[in-house]
């Protein structure tokens, strides 16, 4: 039976599946929730988790399609960095590198405690993969110096050294 808590409960089932890393089930549950409860107060979170689930399943076009409406209008401020980062990953997965880098740069500029350093690290990695070791080294250095307490600081310092080695510096 539909109670006033049904929408919340349906969202929570999808959310739990996501946090249990059961992304296939999460996509089904979150899609059902979104279809059945348009306009509900947790829709933005459901879209974010659905997009991230599609990314984890390497269904990048589906992730982009779900996340795009979040970024088309002003998303809730508390998930702006999350949704932008997830969209950048979906663009990377589709080899839309220039768009991904632009979005990662926006995330880095947001000064998000959870995502700015990750976006800088992703940008550096993309430069490195492309053979632009100067830019890669610079970006890896930014991660290591601007975010010294983050888990990516050590790998960033190492990768900066590898980039410089490739440049024979």
Image: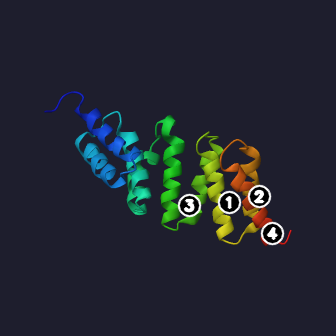
Q: Is residue 10 left or right of residue 121?
A: left
Q: Which mark is residue 138?
A: 2
10 Å crowding of disc 4: few (<14), some (14-19), many (20+): few
The location of residue 159, given as percent across then percent down, is 72, 61
Circle 1: element type: helix
Q: Residue 53: which numbered mark, if any?
A: none
**Callout 3: 10 Å neighbours few (<14), some, many (20+)?**
some
Secondary element under disc 4, as helix, strand or loop, is: helix
Relative to 55, 14 lies left or right? left
Q: Are marks 3 and 4 in contact (CB under 8 Å)?
A: no
- The residue beneath circle 3 is 99
Q: Which residue is mark 1?
A: 124
Compared with 140, 19 (above or below) is above
Q: Earlier in the sequence, mark 3 or mark 1?
A: 3
- The image quadrant where one finds the C terminus is bottom right
Which circle's residue, 3 or 4, is located before the other in the chain? 3
Label 3–label 1 contact, CB within 8 A: no
Total number of numbered labels? 4
Q: Secondary structure at mark 2?
A: helix
Q: Pinpoint residue 75: horizontal percent, then vertical percent.
A: 46, 40
The residue most toward the left is 1
Residue topped by disc 4: 165
Q: Nearer the viewer, mark 3 or mark 4?
A: 4
């Amino acid at each position: 039976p539909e109670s006033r808590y049904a929408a919340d409960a349906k969202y929570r089932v999808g959310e739990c599946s996501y946090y249990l890393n059961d992304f296939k089930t999460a996509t089904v549950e979150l899609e059902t929730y979104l279809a059945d409860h348009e306009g509900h107060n947790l829709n933005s979170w459901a879209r974010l988790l659905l997009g991230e689930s599609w990314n984890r399943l390497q269904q990048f076009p589906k992730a982009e399609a779900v996340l795009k409406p979040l970024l088309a209008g002003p998303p809730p401020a508390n998930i702006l960095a999350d949704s932008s980062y997830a969209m950048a990953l979906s663009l990377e997965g589709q080899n839309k590198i220039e768009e991904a880098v632009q979005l990662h740069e926006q995330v880095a500029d947001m000064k998000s405690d959870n995502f700015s350093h990750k976006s800088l690290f992703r940008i550096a990695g993309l430069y490195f993969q492309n053979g632009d070791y100067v830019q890669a080294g610079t970006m890896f250095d930014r991660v290591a110096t601007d975010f010294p307490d983050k888990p990516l600081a050590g790998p960033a310092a190492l990768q900066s050294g590898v980039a410089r080695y490739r440049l024979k510096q």
